[in-house]
Amino acid sequence: MTSKTGLEFKVGDAVVYPAHGVGKVAAIETQEVAGMSLEVYVVTFDHEKMTLRVPTKKAKTAGLRTLAADDTVTKALTTLKGRARIKRTMWSRRAQEYEAKINSGDLISIAEVVRDLHRADTQPEQSYSERQLYESALDRMAREVAAANRIDKDAAVALLAKSLSAKKPVAPAAEEAEAEAA
């Protein structure tokens, strides 16, 4: 949705940048780059203490987007309740796929990673790399759900935990295959 000024976002809008998650448009500036005048969105990410400048004309191709709509958040929470789908490939290949899904910025893809890597108390412990990916995906998803529902991050994590507790267990064959691959 483009405004009358041709800009997609306004100062103060919450936005999602695929590689960094939820940020806020702090300003729209014109900067001199290589002798050319360039209009940029200044996006701040408080959780990473980072500022990103995205050219306004390249914002869409860079993946900058608005927060997920309510129906997308609902679909993501429903995804968490589904059965984990763990491929029978080597962990390194799956880890790359999970990382790609997390960095895609797509809430449903991130929910799939959270669902697949979530471990109930009754299941064996995760490896360090599994836990790192899981926590990264959970954090990214919780921040977007929190921003979309206008709640704090802890309430969003509780909401995600509630959905995960309703999750169907991993099929035994998938667990065995995962143990062999690890």
Image (cartoon, grey):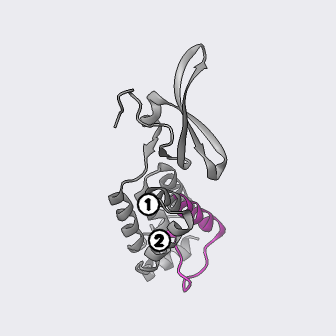
Residue at the extreme bottom? 122
SS for callout 2 = helix
The quadrant in which the N terminus is found is top left
- Above or below residue 55? Residue 116 is below
State the residue in front, 80 or 88. 80
Asked whether 5 falls inside the magenta stretch, the response is no
Magenta-tinted stretch: 116-140
- Residue designated by label 2: 159
From the viewer's perspective, is the residue at label 1 or at label 2 nearer? Answer: 1
Q: Tell me how far mark 1 sits from mark 2, CA to CA.
A: 11 Å
User: Quick check: 88 above or below 7?
Assistant: below
For badge 1, the amino acid type reads Asn
Q: In which quarter of the view is residue 133 placed?
A: bottom right
**Residue appearing at x 54%, y 47% in the figure:** 23
Q: In percent of the image, x 51 and y 73: which residue is there?
A: 158
Graded by Cα atoms within 10 Å as few (under 14), some (14 to 19) or many (20 or more), the crowding at tag 1 reads some
Mark closest to the chain's N terminus, 1 or 2 = 1
Looking at the picture, how far across and down is residue 167, in whole percent? 42, 78
Contact flag, marks 1 and 2 (Cβ < 8 Å) = yes
* Residue type beneath disc 2: Leu
What secondary structure prevails in the magenta region? Answer: helix
Q: Residue furthest top?
A: 35
